Image (cartoon, helix red, strand yellow):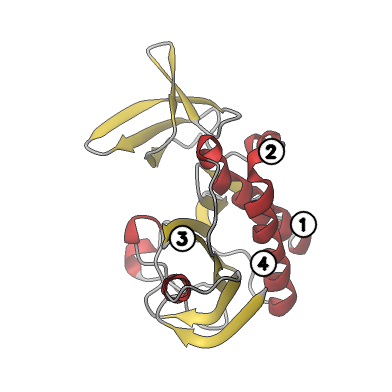
Amino acid sequence: MQVYQYDQVESTQDLAKDYLKNKNKKKAAFVAQSQTNGYGKRGRFFYSPAQTGIYFSMAFPNFEIVREKINLLTPCIATNVVDVLRKFYPQKDFRLKWVNDIYLKNKKVAGILTEYENSGLIIGVGINIATHDFPEQIRFKAGYISDTLFEHKKMTNELLQAVDLASKNYGQNQFMEQYRKLSWLIGKRVNLKLGKKEVTGLVKTIDDAGKLVILTNNEAHSFSSGEVTKVELT
């Protein structure tokens, strides 16, 4: 796999999109020291300052998604990313917020974005390793992992391998037991936003299909999409 390295870009995700648009046939990765216009789910700005985090996107041309397994892709990536982070930071209690965020001490430290463009798959990963000074609008939601960023190259390479592996193995769903163990939501009351509708209830589990199962009025309801906008901390 070709890995392209940059000091600064607008967005690694956009570089991956351009790569697919140009009909390249081999998978590739785009790694940047910083991004001026990095973004995550729903186009939200992802703060990506230099020398404090890991930011990359991977492009998989002509990726054939298994439709009935599509909800497993992001959980598999997230589980693999946490496995790498725990290797470098074994004392940290990383948790997964369904479906694409990694949390530490109730604050988001990493995000995963999957997009489909020009018959290809793009997987973006952004991690706040040692990012301390956040913009005011995210200061109380965003967190960081460590005071310093070390072994940047080695960690990035292992993360690229982990994401690549997830793109191949997501349909097997053996990782879901681990995903549930890492869940930040199971057992908590949450608000789930579904377009203009909102569901409130207790998260019972995340099933083997990657769906969030919420108890409302003693009835279990499964959701394959939506955004958890509020979590009641205990």
Disc 3 crowd rating (10 Å Cα; few below 14, some 14-19, many 20+) is many
Dot 1 or dot 2: first in sequence order is 1
Dot 4 or dot 1: first in sequence order is 1
Left or right of 194: which side holds 183? Answer: right
Between disc 4 and disc 2, the foreground one is 2
Between disc 4 and disc 3, the foreground one is 4
Do callouts 3 and 1 mark residues in contact (Cβ within 8 Å)? no
43, above or below 14, in the image: above
Observer-nearest of 141 and 58: 58
Q: Position of residue 53 (x, y in %)?
A: 57, 73
Question: What residue is shown with label 3?
Answer: 142
20, above or below 229, in the image: below
Dot 3 or dot 1: first in sequence order is 1
- Residue found 52% across the figure and 49% down from its top: 106
Question: What residue is shown with label 1?
Answer: 90
Q: Secondary structure at mark 1?
A: loop
Q: Position of residue 230 (x, y in %)?
A: 38, 40
Label 4, label 3: how many angstroms apart (C-alpha)? 23 Å
Question: What residue is shown with label 4?
Answer: 160
- Residue found 55% across the figure and 76% down from its top: 30
Dot 4 or dot 2: first in sequence order is 4
Left or right of 141: which side holds 69? Answer: right
Q: Position of residue 200 (x, y in %)?
A: 35, 27
Three-letter amino acid code at the position of disc 2: Gln
Q: Quadrant of residue 154?
A: bottom right
Q: Position of residue 24 (x, y in %)?
A: 52, 74
Label 4, label 2: how many angstroms apart (C-alpha)? 20 Å
Question: What residue is shown with label 2?
Answer: 172
Q: Secondary structure at mark 4?
A: helix
Q: Quadrant of the N terminus?
A: bottom right
